[in-house]
Amino acid sequence: ISPLPLLLPYPDVRVRPSTKLANAQRSRYYTGTMFSFRTTENCTRTAARTGWLSTPHGLIQTPAFMPVGTRGAIKGVTTRQLRETGTEIMLANTYHMALRPGEQLVEKLGGLHKFIGWDGPILTDSGGFQVFSLDELRQIDDHGVTFRSTVDGSWLRLTPQRAVQIQNSLGADIIMALDVCPPAHASTRQMIDAVRRTLVWAEQCKKAHQRPEQWLFAIVQGGLDDDQRYTCLRELAAMDFPGYAIGGLSVGEPPPQMHRILQWLGPALPVSKPRYLMGVGRPLDIAEAVACGIDMFDCVMPTRNGRNGYAFTSTGPVRLKNSKWTQAAEPLDPACSCYTCSRFSKSYLRHLFVAGEMLGPILVSLHNLHYYQEFMAKIRQAIRACTFADWLTQYRASPAACSGPNGPEDI
């Protein structure tokens, strides 16, 4: 089945006048204890859009980036520091939280927000990504997945119903349906089976969901196979979930192949629902995905790279362990106003890494998180000003676009 009927013609969009993000506008879109999603501006030359996602724990400006706190913590960063980077929503993982400390304990102590000391929105992944990442420690069948615990070697059974039950107990604002995330090199038979199970499990997750104050998102799988992606999207759209995610990308395929899928799949997702691209975190890939109509992103890159002395900056990536920064008196990024850049030099930050001081990973992680949130703010500003297409062209040619594991600095 060809996806082209969903692509052409593009919807006729109208651009609203650009408005400042003042408290009055924020209160206009915040519904308190209710969920809502509304797009506010649309780019006429791409599928990029801005919007407001209202949750019981606060309002999120989209496009939005979600830092990953797999075990209920952004590594090396307090929730107060996280808020100061401009972060509005964070992510935690169902599989890891179920292993330790267990969802029953979290629920007993007041839910995930209270347990981790974060009063903003939270999204929990279903554990479907671990089907991909822990392939040597799991057994999959039509009814669910059995994992060997990474903590103590015991077995954990995760069915669609169990995945939803765990997330209902944790109490996140947005929860995800259990899916099967196949590797990029999966065979056609494996891809068909993954999509079939993802569709059956999505329906089972929806039936098992018990808390209306949580939004349950479905996940479109299918790898790089257009037909399987379209089949999965069509069937999930008919189930009418509150939001839709794209999974199974950035799992080993070259970026151009990912971009090709997004160019037709992003605009084809239900226009009135939030669109979430899972696990994609290179700034260039985020910008390209925004142009395809994506609203939400998550990735471990800001903090994982930060812990390893890799900083994202407006002039390109900085590897602080490189000896050329030994006597560098300038900040990481002269254009950055974060705590790290306003107080410390590259020389000092390099010293912290060479000396094995834990402050180094903390300071660079803080900078990277701030960089990502400022990056998303620039994207939103460009969309509102009707200049996003030109901004994207300029960004592609900039040194900052080389940041990330697939950029020239990593060759």
Image (cartoon, rainbow, N blue to C red):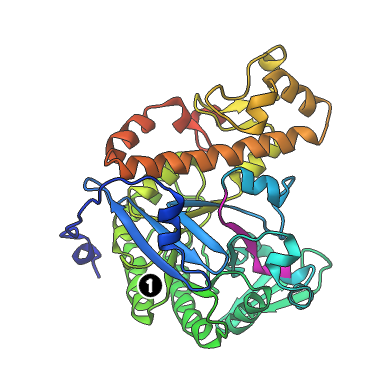
Q: Quadrant of the C terminus?
A: top right
Question: Where residue 352 sits: x, y (%)?
Answer: 79, 27
Residue lying at 84% horizontally and 67% vertically, measured from the top left: 152
Span highlighted in magenta in the image = 87-97
Q: Secondary structure at mark 1?
A: helix
> Is 382 colored magenta in this rendering?
no
> Is 88 colored magenta in this rendering?
yes
Is residue 43 shown above or below 125? above
Residue lying at 66% horizontally and 43% vertically, measured from the top left: 304
Residue at numbered disc 1: 232
Residue lying at 15% horizontally and 59% vertically, measured from the top left: 9
Residue 96 visible in the picture: no
Q: Tell whether 94 sits left or right of 173.
A: right
Q: Quadrant of the N terminus?
A: bottom left
Q: 258 or 54: nearer the eye?
A: 54
Q: Type of residue at label 1?
A: Cys
Image-quadrant location for residue 24: bottom left
